[in-house]
Image (cartoon, rainbow, N blue to C red):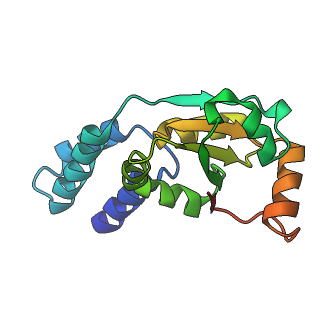
Amino acid sequence: QLSLFFDAFILQYKFGVNEFNKEKMFNYLMNKYPSSKSVEILRRYIQEDLDDKKELKTAFLANDSVSSFKDFSKDTNFTNKYLFIDVWASWCMPCRAEFTHNKALDKLLSKYNNIEKIYISIDEDKDSWKSAIKNHNLSGFHILANTKLKEYLNKNIFDSKGITIPRYIL
């Protein structure tokens, strides 16, 4: 049963499912099971996270003026830039699992000074969206898709078959 508990903790920790106070939970486990191999594994995860913590650099784009990708060209942040677009939602577990690769993606994109990353969320709940951005340390430009942008995505990117995520567009 203890093993199952640690497995659940690791899933929640790595994929941001059911966010909770990770440090408080880790301290509890460390005090309760000090010689456990599972606690040592968790310690490594936490140390990796602490080592990777960077200042969150986000910019939220006004969603009322964006109804297609062409509208991004009106923003001076994207002049003469390629866009790496990540279509996602806070409730999408595959999307959140993919965020574990952001460190490698950021390293790759940093080699090019003409690529900007935009996260387009199809969330309905603004608070969940912002919480997931913070929890996953998602630096970059963010927009919460309005109805027109969702219609554009469905028609032009997904051939009117419904929006499936995660989806990446360059």
| Residue toward you, 65 or 47 | 65
| Residue toward you, 164 or 6 | 164
136 to the left or right of 123: left
- Please provide percent x and percent y for residue 86: 61, 53
136 to the left or right of 41: right
Above/below status of 33 relative to 62: below
Looking at the image, the residue that sits furthest to the left is 35
Q: Which residue is depicted at the point 70% across and 30% down?
A: 61
Picture quarter with the N terminus? bottom left
Q: Which residue is depicted at the point 37% across and 55% down?
A: 104
- Please provide percent x and percent y for residue 60: 65, 29
Looking at the image, the residue that sits furthest to the front is 80
Q: Which residue is depicted at the point 85% across and 71% down?
A: 161
- Please provide percent x and percent y for residue 40: 16, 55
- Please provide percent x and percent y for residue 33: 17, 52
Q: Is residue 19 visible?
A: yes
Q: Is residue 28 visible?
A: no
In the figure, residue 92 lies in which quadrant?
Answer: bottom right
Above/below status of 56 relative to 8: above
Q: Which residue is depicted at the point 49% across and 44% down?
A: 19
